[in-house]
Structures are given as structure tokens and as C-alpha cells.
Image (cartoon, helix red, strand yellow):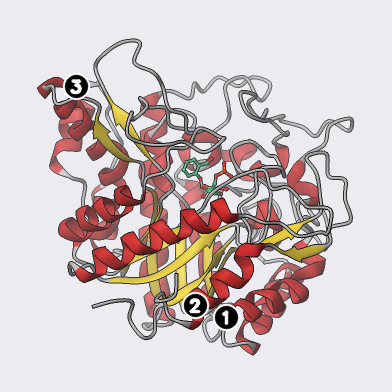
Amino acid sequence: MTFKDNFLWGGATAANQLEGAFDLDGKGLNVADMKTVGGRGKSRVFTPTLDLETYYPSHKAIDFYHHYKEDIAMFAEMGFKVFRLSINWSRIFPQGDELEPNEAGLAFYDKVFDECLKYGIEPLVTLSHFEIPLGLMEKYNGFLSRETIDHFVHYATTCFERYKNKVKYWITFNELNFGTMPHGELTVLGLHPKGAFPLDEIPSNEQNRFQALHHAMVASAKAIIKAKEINPNFEIGCMMAHITMYPLTSSPEDVLQTKEYDLLVNKFVSDVQVRGKYPALIEGYFKNKNIELDIPEEDLDILAKGTVDMYTFSYYMTICVTQQHGAPASMGNLVGGAANPYLESSEYGWQIDPIGLEYTLIDLYDRYEIPLFIVENGLGMEDEVAADGSINDDYRIAYFKAHFEAMNRAIEKGVDLIGYTSWGCIDLISAGTGEMRKRYGFIYVDMDNDGKGTLKRSKKKSFDWYKEVIASNGQKL
Ligand code: P53
């Protein structure tokens, strides 16, 4: 067994990291538009209002808004079967709570999808990729309010209706499981950061974070129920940032802690979205932490009905978990963890672990037995442009090769893997650092961390390599 004939090879992006045109054609501000540039060891800052002196990377990004034809043509040249992108929610509903959508926003995505379909590329569309309209944060404290459920469902339904004949593959929320971790409340749930607004009295504590997460899961399920009424052929996925974890040592304490942390971070949200109910052990977790959620009876029914068709996830690295204090740390932007002495790290401190991907595929398929789709994976590095203009990213080719071999082995063992979209198939803004310097693409974009550059696109060495991979359906690595 190996990659299926119709295996969906492609690349992935998100609107706020790609499009730019942050205030064109009626678009409102979203949460990502308020984040500054950070870097290694320097956090991005969320500013509640725009500071005119500050550079906000999403405002320009790589200007896909005006380059989409050229970019999609390059994806087609690589042979993409699928292109993952997100709809920028505040292009469609500028404040988030309007009744009527912004036609100019809808028309932009019509053009983008038509361009994809022209080349036989299936769009895979994320509805909320860290882009909650700022208006929903200001007025409702994001998903902490139940009202936001209906605003999301209205937005989702508008998109399903409009694009029902153009888009088959959908994801409701990107990496919703970040809601189980501190700092995830702003990015994925749209909660006010503490003190962001005057008279901000609502603390972003664990109780509120899990309440908001509950509302987001209900919103996702409600949207899926609507989607299936609109087009029963839609394929809809959850989306987890899968932070695969190992015990640092064989001490039973480390093994136990790893198990419990995995259930909370990697399994809880997808259990709800795949199986349609809260896992039993999360109730115990909430009880021990004195977290009491407000869950009306009707929500349980919605969660049970609005389950996903496929398990979609991102995979970049693995971390180790330990009870020991002072163990050397590994670094993921939102997720810490102990360093694994058997693994190398990227220059951004992300531990490279292809066998971890094989392990993850087996673990997930064993648990859920539904099709799996890797919708993000890749290596973020600073690339160098040689004097002749070439970019020899052999390190990236080596990373992909090892991960594709791991996918192949998992498929041989019986895992049903239906697709793969590499993250940032064209260089774009980093979500974690806001930098342009941290690059993932097969396509280089001439732009620096301050937004300066010609925006010219050029092929890296990995471009032709990936083209061969797709042409041989994963056999020529
Ligand atoms: P950047 C951390 C760990 C795993 C997934 O990340 C993550 C993050 C966020 O830093 O998020 C996804 O750009 C996310 C993308 C993001 C990509 O990983 O920090 O869905 O938006 O760009 C890579 O290197």
C-alpha cells in the first residue's frame, strides 16, 4: 500500500499571513491585524488600537490580494491538487455582527476559487484561522459570549451557500485545541487580553477560556449541521495543532503526566468534534480545577450531530514532558516542553521528528478510524539568496523527504491518509513571530521583516523537487 491515486498533494496558507490589503474593499479589522512583529525570544504584542508608528505585518503580508493569479499559476505548475487558504472573516462581515455580508469580500474569494478550479486545484477552506473580527472581541469578548456562536454560524452559512459549487473541503476553526492552552484565548477564541480595553473587568482565566472554547465547539458543530443541509457532499474537518509528546524518562511520573497532558491538549477537542461528546476524563479535570461550565442541554445535541468527516491537523515537531524541574527546554511558540536528547532542532528551536509523524498517524487512526489529512507541516528557516539568485534549500528537501517516507510507512501499516498540504507553500508572515524571515515556502518572496522588498516571487530548489514528488505520487523522493 502507498499513497492513494487521488491523494491530495498541495500547500497551505492563511489569509492574515498572506493577503495584505487589510483595509481594502470594505474589510474590517481582525485580531491578527493588531499584532506587531516579534522574533526569536521577542513576543508579538497585541495593541487594542492601531499605532500609526508601528508596522503590522498582516496589513501588507505578501499581497496575495493582488498577486493571486500569479501565485496560483505557480502552485499549478508544481501540480497541486489542493490549495488550503482561509477566508478572512472580516472581509465578509467587517465588524462580525452585521446581517448583510460585504459583497466585495465575497467576490474576491469567487475570483480566487475560480482561478484554482481553472487548474483543477481543489480549494480547502478554513473559516476561522486566527482572524476573528476585532468588533466581536470588543463587543462580545469573542467566544466568551454565546452571541458569537450565531455570528460565526451566520458567516459560515453565508460562505457555504455562496461557494457550495466551488468548494468541497472545509475546516471550521484552525487549531482550536490552542484553546486548551494559556495564550490561546486571544488568537483562537478572540478573548480580550487582560487590560486591552478600558474598563476591562473580565479576566482571561481558565474558567473563561474553557467556556469560550465550549462556545467555539458548539459554533463549529452548528455550522457543520448547516453545511450538510446546504451540500451533503461537503467534506469537513476539525483542525488540531498536534503537539505530539513523549515522556522525557521512563519514570512512571513522567509517563503519567504525558498521558494526561496529551488527553487535554491533543485529544479533548478532537474527541468532541469527531465523537460528538465531551470525553469522560475531561469532566474529572474540570472538577479538580473547580471549572464549572455553563452547558445548556441543547448544546449536547448540537455537538452530537455536528461531527466532522475527517481529522485534519498540523504537525511540526514533538516535545517531551517531565516532572523534573530544570530539564533543558525545547521551544514551540505557544507550547513549551523538555528537549529530546535524540532529536535535532531547527534554528527556531522546533524539534525535527519524522518518526514522530508516523507515530502520530498511527495513534490518531487507532483512536478515530476516520480519514486523516495533514494540512500543515514544514520547516521554517531563514533562506539565503545566492549571488545568481538561486535558493538552495536542501535542508527543506531533506525535512520533507523524511516526513513523506514516514507517511508512506504509516499508510503501509493501514492508516487512511487522504492528503497533505505543506505549510506556507509560498513564503508568508509567521504566525508565531510575525516575521517574514521565518520562511517555509517552495516559492521565495522578496520581502523583509519590516515589509520592505519588491514582492517578487522566485522558485527555490525545493520547487522542482516537490513538483516531482507530486508527479510521481510520492514515489520519487
Ligand atoms: P509559525 C505553533 C505550534 C504549532 C502550530 O507557525 C502553530 C504554532 C504557531 O506558532 O501554528 C500553525 O508561523 C498555524 C499557522 C502558522 C504555522 O503553524 O509560528 O496554523 O498559522 O503559521 C507555523 O512558524
Q: Relative to the observer, which residue lies in front, 430 or 275? A: 430
Label 3 packing within 10 angstroms: few (<14), some (14-19), many (20+): few
Q: CA distance from mark 3 to mark 1?
A: 51 Å
Q: Secondary structure at mark 1?
A: loop
Which is more foreground, mark 3 or mark 1? 1
Q: Give the quadrant of the C terminus.
A: bottom left
In this view, 230 is above or below 10? below
Label 1 packing within 10 angstroms: few (<14), some (14-19), many (20+): many
Q: Position of residue 472 (x, y in %)?
A: 45, 82
Q: Position of residue 139 (x, y in %)?
A: 62, 39
Q: Secondary structure at mark 3?
A: helix
The amino acid beneath tag 2 is Ile
In this view, 212 is above or below 464? above
Which of the marked residues, 2 or 1, is nearer the chain's N terminus? 1
Q: Relative to the observer, which residue lies in front, 176 or 227? A: 176
Judged left or right of residue 132, residue 260 is: left
Q: Which residue corresponds to mark 1?
A: 79
In this view, 130 is above or below 165? above
Q: Position of residue 101 (x, y in %)?
A: 67, 66
Which of the marked residues, 2 or 3, is nearer the chain's N terminus? 3
Dot 2 and dot 3 residues touching (CB under 8 Å): no
Q: Which residue corresponds to mark 3?
A: 288
